[in-house]
Amino acid sequence: MSATVMDGTAVANELLRDTGRRAAEFERAHGRKATLATVLVGDNPASHTYVRMKTHRCRRAGLASQRHDLASEATTAQVVDRVQQLSTDPVVDGILVQHPLPASIDQRRVFEAITPAKDVDGVTSASFAAMAFGQPGFASCTPAGIMHLLDTYNVPLAGRHTVVVGRSPILGKPLGMLLLARDTTLTYCHSKTTDLPDVVARADILIAAVGRPELIRGEWIKPGAVVIDAGYNPGNIGDVDYDTASTRASLITPVPGGVGPMTIAVLLAQTLDAAHAAANKVRLPSN
Ligand code: NAP
């Protein structure tokens, strides 16, 4: 058997086109572009690349972007102060704090300074609670992107066993909340899991979110399973051994071109949601 490849680039492009249409409508109605503000602290080259990509995507979709660069010596209080200013700035619709922040900064305190109505990256406790309780609010972008991919490919979730490998606050953990809300039977694995191959072998849907190249061996995959690889390791290598896994899975995401493109697409879509909700004084969409 050879798996069908889930084309994240095509799905993301469709979402970006839809966001572009909504951005043009917003500008016509409100006389300004929906705006994403990005806060970047320090000089991590990968973070600079991600921020440039996001700026470029904003421009192409018809959103405005602001960039707020702070030196790596900035204190937590200084970064919090900047985020609080953006939280009350009426022309800023969404706020993205590029992470990881330098180790000297209290990342959680910085995230919590984002007002939930502008938390388009879904990193605050309020957004996590909204995901967990199915309330209005923003989802974390990569998890929401994975859900969008699963839905685009009509993957049934209710009653099926989904294994999420990884429990980080921005990826594995919130993804589990979104999956549970859709009635999947959920198992989380992490670095202390002792029987990873056995648990993976029971997954109808496997989601790898670890950051360890090819940690998940292809022969562990249950024949016919759906495999989503969110891992992105140097050399464009995922967390799943793709060559073997793709001979056993029914659907699989490639790396790159699977989960990766979905994250920015969701970020921009949620910025439009934030702009629309604020301008029209309506509730945010529910998770
Ligand atoms: P992270 O914060 O380092 O979390 C990694 C998770 O994997 C942790 O929960 C850790 O367990 C678990 N883990 C580590 N070693 C393991 C092992 N041997 N067996 C089972 N679990 C193990 O990473 P992250 O930020 O979630 O990112 C994970 C991957 O996704 C990375 O490759 C990253 O580049 C990629 N990513 C992609 C996107 C995108 O846009 N496509 C976005 C975000 C992240 P503990 O909790 O026990 O430490």
Image (tube, rainbow, N blue to C red):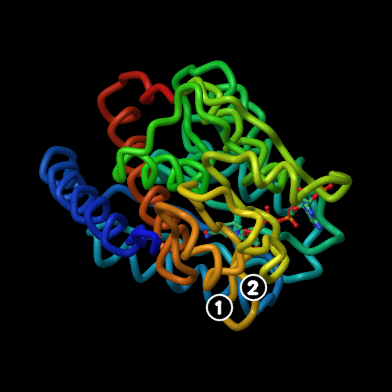
**Which residue type carries mark 1?**
Asn
Q: Quadrant of the C terminus?
A: top left
Residue 179 position in % (x across, y down): 52, 30
Residue in view at x 25 percent, y 66 percent: 60
Mark 2 neighbour class, 10 Å CA radius: few under 14, some 14 to 19, many 20 or more: some
Viewer-closest of 255 and 144? 255
Give x and y (percent) for residue 45: 64, 80
Q: Quadrant of ligand 1?
A: bottom right
Does any atom of ligand 1 lie closer than 8 Å to the CB of label 2? yes
Labels 2 & 1 near each other (Cβ < 8 A): yes
Judging by the rendered image, the residue that carries numbered circle 1 is: 236
Identify the residue under disc 2.
233
Left/right of residue 23 with respect to residue 134 in the rendered view = left
Q: Is residue 259 left or right of residue 42?
A: left
Residue 67, position as x, y percentages in the image: 49, 64
**Residue plotted at (22% across, 54% down):** 14
